[in-house]
Amino acid sequence: MTTRRVTTFAAATAAVAILLTGCSSSDAPASAPAAGGAVTPEAVTAAVGALDGIVTADLQATGIPGAAVAVVYRGQVVYAKGFGVRQVGRPEPVDADTVFQVASVSKAIAGSVIGAAATQKRASWTDTIASRLPGFTLSDPYVGANVTVADMLAHRSGLPESQFSTDILEDLGYSQADILARQRLLPLEPFRETWGYTNYGLTSGGEAAAAAAGTTWADLAQQTIFGPLGMASSSYRYADVANRPDRAALHKREANGSWTPSLTFDVDPQAPAGGASTSVNDMTKWMTMLLAEGKNGATTVIDTANLNQMWGPQVQRAPVEDVGGPFQFYGEGWNVERDSSDRLSVNHSGAFQTGSGTNVKLLPTEGLGIVTLTNGTPDGLAEAINQRFFDQVENGKQSRDWLALYRQAFAQLSEPVDPTDYTKPAPQVTPPQAPTAYVGTYRSDFWGDLVVSTAPDGTLSMVVGPERQQYPLAHYTGDTFWFTPRGESAFGNSGLVFAGPQLTVNAWNKVPGLGVFRKVG
């Protein structure tokens, strides 16, 4: 994740990229896994035997309510187990059939959905988005006309990271159609040269593939992956997970350390990027197919060409800082690496601040894979469990404190978008103008109208978005006020700076100029 944070809709999206390229800690690994030692049946058996203790200890250390873990090796499910509870305050335990909302692990599944559809000649990686989604374009007309499904799944379209743009539109209540259309207003980095993690870019690719196949995204996933593999508890529809009897609630960690459960988190608008739900028992069927070179028994689900497309290095995810350092790539919905034994290693994480942390990691040449699903605000638990397992397999021991390392990296990524601490007095406080000086309608082509009004007591508030979300404004100093954003992309408080006919929302201005509104009334 370059500078991206652990968020909602991605959720480990950007965080995973940073974690896998190394974090700022002096003892952080250059890549993971660091060793890439021999994989033997005996080593796998020993590591599986250690998993109960690993998961139990790490759950206790983090306080996350529940987790489920499964391991596949050479076509066999060698471990599948649940830990903890589905929802705090209730007794029902997590088991291997408990359904979790898996956040950005959805992207890896999406890559396989499109790979299977391409194998069946129902869609193509080279389909342009504009040819399948009428009216689609981007700020550069050439890119808008030529960007493909493959470009979007690999995050190489040039769109900026979505946490600072389109994800916030979802928080404000905009529809998928509105959000996909407003991507045309975003500035672009060089096409097919830079990697920028964007949920709605990838969603554009998924929706274009579904349109090519003449169906919806959720139905395409059911027809190509979930149905053929017998993944009866898996879906890209929120309505399906909402009705599962064995379902894990999401849990948000509050400032006081308590957990707030949620059973109503609907991310259908960006389903290809973050809307999948599944159990570890279902995931073992998917991992088994992938590790069998795309075959489900005698049936080819994803042929070799499309598996190579999915796991091929489509774009470099981050620059190599040291000569001879590890390269980090992204495929089609997957992080792609080579370990120190020059073996292909693929993985993806998912993270919802509302309360889900997930990770899947495969070593295809060894037929080995692990998935961990958790139901709490992500802090590296899923990644640590999976990395500890691979470390145990390859080295017979824990070469470092993986949980501490990942927790530190996730904490850094969750720092406020606006660095000012508005809860403390400004170094020099100057009074505001009269409230009427700020009242009015401020317009942004991207965000829509933002209406500032005043109450009888003189306090200000603003209303924004199609749901007319209301936020009270508190004075900081001079013409600067602040508010607390809501939603998955909300990290801390944000300044709101008036300057004559112009208004800038700091948290929405990480893409320079995007958070600027002009007064129209």
Image (cartoon, rainbow, N blue to C red):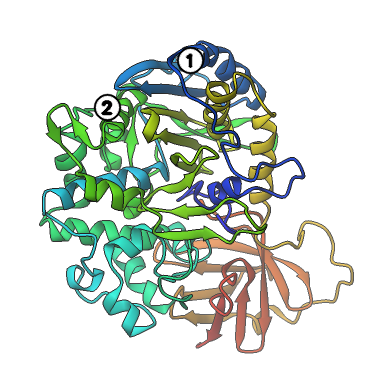
Q: Residues within 10 Å of mark 1 (few under 14, many from 20)?
A: many
User: Which tag, 2 or 1, sits closer to the chain's start?
Assistant: 1
Q: Residues within 10 Å of mark 2 (few under 14, many from 20)?
A: many
In the rendered structure, find residue 48 and report the number of the disc placed on it. Answer: 1
Q: Is residue 245 above or below residue 234?
A: above
Please name the residue that numbered disc 2 is placed on: 285
Q: Which image quadrant for residue 399? A: top right
* 479 or 297: nearer the viewer: 297
Side (left or right) of 146 relative to 195: left
Residue at image coords 29%, 60%: 205
Residue type indicated by callout 2: Lys
The quadrant of the picture occupied by the N terminus is bottom right
In the rendered structure, find residue 27 and report the number of the disc placed on it. Answer: none
Side (left or right) of 418 relative to 218: right
Do we see residue 353 in this rendering? Answer: yes
Q: Position of residue 191 (x, y in %)?
A: 41, 74
Of helix, strand and loop, which one carries label 2? helix
Q: Position of residue 398 (x, y in %)?
A: 65, 23
Residue type indicated by callout 1: Val
Of helix, strand and loop, which one carries label 1? helix
Q: Which image quadrant for residue 102? A: top left
Q: Tell us which disc is closer to us: 2 or 1.
A: 1
Residue at image coords 31%, 72%: 147
Q: Position of residue 484 (x, y in %)?
A: 63, 57
